[in-house]
């Protein structure tokens, strides 16, 4: 089964939400905001990650480059575009990035 991940990046920690191809949440966790820590979680052999979405921000370029170098397919989504599909609650941001079509 294919999986998709949405990353809500903050300075110290990144919220990660992984959904399957039906949009069902498979895993939610917080990981230090460092490419190596994120890659370690996202390269889990149990997952077949098709794409990882992260919102553009101050750390995005650094994390994008680190995840791409780790062999992960990453897309960076412009902040103004995410507002059109995000759920009302900020807590739902990684789920929205992963599951509402931008990563799929």
Image: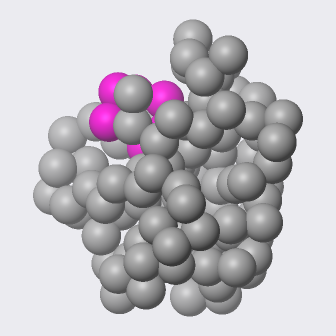
The image position of residue 85, as x and y in percent, is: 28, 36
Q: Is residue 90 visible?
A: no
Please state the extent of the stretch shown in magenta in the rendering.
97-102
Residue 86 within the segment the image draws in magenta: no
Q: In the image, what residue occupies the spot 75% across and 76% down?
A: 37
Q: Which residue lies most toward the top here?
A: 22
The image position of residue 11, as x and y in percent, is: 56, 88
Q: Which residue lies most toward the left here?
A: 80
The image position of residue 77, as x and y in percent, is: 27, 56
Q: Nearer the viewer, residue 87 or 15?
A: 15
Q: In the image, what residue occupies the spot 39% across and 37% down?
A: 103
Q: Is residue 28 visible?
A: yes
Residue 98 within the segment the image draws in magenta: yes
Quarter of the image that includes the C terminus: top left
Colouring: one colour
Q: In the image, what residue occupies the spot 51% across and 35% down?
A: 50
Q: In the image, what residue occupies the spot 76% across and 30% down?
A: 26
Count of labels in the image: 0
Quarter of the image that includes the N terminus: top right
Q: Nearer the viewer, residue 89 or 36?
A: 36
């Amino acid at each position: 089964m294919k999986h998709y991940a949405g990353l809500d990046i903050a300075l110290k920690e990144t919220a990660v939400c992984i959904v399957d191809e039906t949009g069902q949440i498979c895993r939610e966790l917080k990981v230090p905001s460092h490419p190596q820590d994120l890659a370690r979680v996202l390269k889990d052999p149990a997952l077949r990650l098709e794409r990882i979405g992260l919102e553009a921000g101050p750390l995005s370029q650094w994390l994008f480059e680190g995840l791409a170098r780790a062999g992960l397919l990453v897309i960076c989504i412009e902040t103004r575009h995410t507002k059109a599909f995000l759920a009302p609650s900020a807590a739902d941001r990684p789920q929205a990035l992963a599951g509402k079509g931008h990563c799929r």
